[in-house]
Image: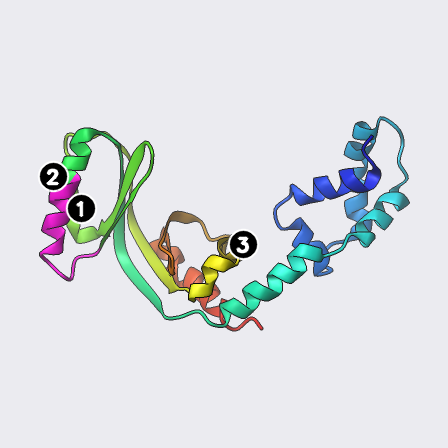
Amino acid sequence: MESIGKITEDLINRSPFLREAITDNLINISALARKLKPEIEEKLNKPVKEGAIVMTIKRMSPGLYHRLNIKITNMMSELGDFLVRSNLSDFTYENSESLKSSQSDFIQLMRKESDNFYTISQGLSETTFIVSAGQNDLVKHFFRNEKLKTHNEKLASVTVKLPSVNTEIYGVYYYILKQLAWEGINIVQVVSTSNEFTIVVKQDEIDGAFKILMNLKRIL
């Protein structure tokens, strides 16, 4: 049979940012207990005292989150250069055999001009091209026979160079994305390699996103 402690912890862990907020003393524990009480009682099929829930929450150890947060915070102070690009567009097409062929020709052409920016992300069912807005007509021409699923203009990106240790610490991307989410920054696309992480946002949100990412280096 499940206990009050187990149910309470499960409910808290399913809510984004809640465990962290409790650890940082940003949550009114009594108010949280009142909010959780009906669901806990439903799962236990019996009345539960609010005080018991409060004590359960207070006894929860920061444990993994606290240890992980220290590792990530230390790593953030070692972030490398940031690169901002503006005036971008993205195109997402449904995967097909003809798309692969056209994609190869497109890449060959883009490589001939060193100042062109483009990145390609291929998933199981779709492929996204992110290019400088000046290449919009070129993309439309090369993939004119493909099924376009989404297209966005007036985008910008920030690329963060991560220290190599980032691949040994889980939760790095979550930590970065959490900061952006807390500030209401909507991410249109994410592109990553082993030691680089790029977010694509609307052009009018790039200043806010850049400021948040820069502040990560100053959190000690």
Mark 1, residues whose alpha carbon is within 10 Å: few (<14), some, or many (≥20)? some
Find numbered disc 3 in the image and state the secondary structure of the residue it sits on. Answer: loop
Residue at 88% of width from left, 28% of height from top?
46
Q: CA distance from mark 2 to mark 1?
A: 9 Å
Closer to us: 76 or 178: 76
- Disc 2 or disc 3, which is closer to the eye? 3
Q: CA distance from mark 2 to mark 3?
A: 40 Å
**Which amino acid does the dot numbered 1 rest on?**
Asn
Residue 80 placement (x, y as % from top left) = 40, 70
**Which amino acid does the dot numbered 3 rest on?**
Gly
- Position of 131 with respect to 125 (left or right) is left
Q: CA distance from mark 1 to mark 3?
A: 35 Å
The residue that mark 3 highlights is 171
Above or below — where is 109 with respect to 161? above
Q: Which mark is residue 136?
A: 1
Residue 111 placement (x, y as % from top left) = 13, 55
Magenta region: which residues?
103-117
